[in-house]
Image (tube, rainbow, N blue to C red):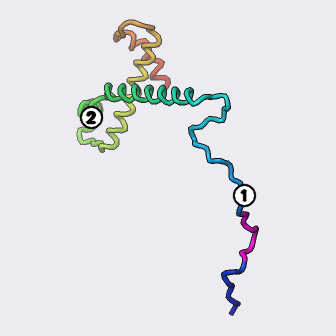
Amino acid sequence: MPPKQSSTRARRGRPAKANKAQPPVRDASESSNPFESSDDQAGEEVEGLTSQKVMAEEEQAEPEKSIPNALLTRILHEFFAKEATRMSRDANAAVGKYVDIFVREAIARTAVEKRGGFLEVEDLEKVAPQLLLDL
């Protein structure tokens, strides 16, 4: 049986330094720039909070529009070869997200090509061939 170690005995390894000066702990928001004033930092914080608040209000004001699930299911079932074909809710949601992205891309491409004004069906028909090829 090994001998017991007494509590007064020093540990192995490096000895602990008792009076070592530690650098002051800096806040994460403090800058390393010595010429920057606290007023500049406060202005940036206020500006950042204001822009975040505006973005949050815009997100709340415009809910994301998408194709209703019932409409999407109806459209998909119109093209099924068998009447008994079924889709799970997860598959329906995945197809809905895909169609939503497809429609948004079509509108974005049409808006870039048209450069202002109202979009017409003919404008969407012009970008449709290239959009389908890009799939």
Q: Secondary structure at mark 2?
A: helix
What amino acid type is highlighted by mark number 1? Answer: Lys
Residue at x-position 73% and y-position 63%: 17
Q: Is residue 4 left or right of residue 96?
A: right
Give residue 69's quadrant in the image: top left
How far across and down, in percent of the image, does residue 62 sit?
32, 25
Q: Is residue 114 left or right of residue 82?
A: right
Residue furthest to the top in view is 117
- State how far apart marks 2 and 1 are (Cα): 67 Å
Sort mark 2 into few (<14), some (14-19) or many (20+) by Cα contacts within 10 Å.
Answer: some
Residue at x-position 27% and y-position 38%: 82
Q: Which residue is mark 2?
A: 69
Q: State the extent of the magenta-drawn residues as a range.
A: 10-17
Residue at x-position 66% and y-position 28%: 35
- Callout in the foreground (2, 1): 1
What amino acid type is highlighted by mark number 2? Answer: Asn
Q: Is residue 3 above or below residue 26?
A: below
Give residue 125's quadrant in the image: top left
How far across and down, in percent of the image, does residue 114 sit?
44, 8
Which sits earlier in the primary sequence, circle 2 or circle 1?
Answer: 1
Residue at x-position 68% and y-position 53%: 22
Magenta portion: prevailing SS class: loop
Q: Which mark is residue 20?
A: 1
Q: Is residue 20 above or below residue 77?
A: below
Q: Which mark is residue 5?
A: none
Q: Is residue 127 above or below residue 61?
A: above
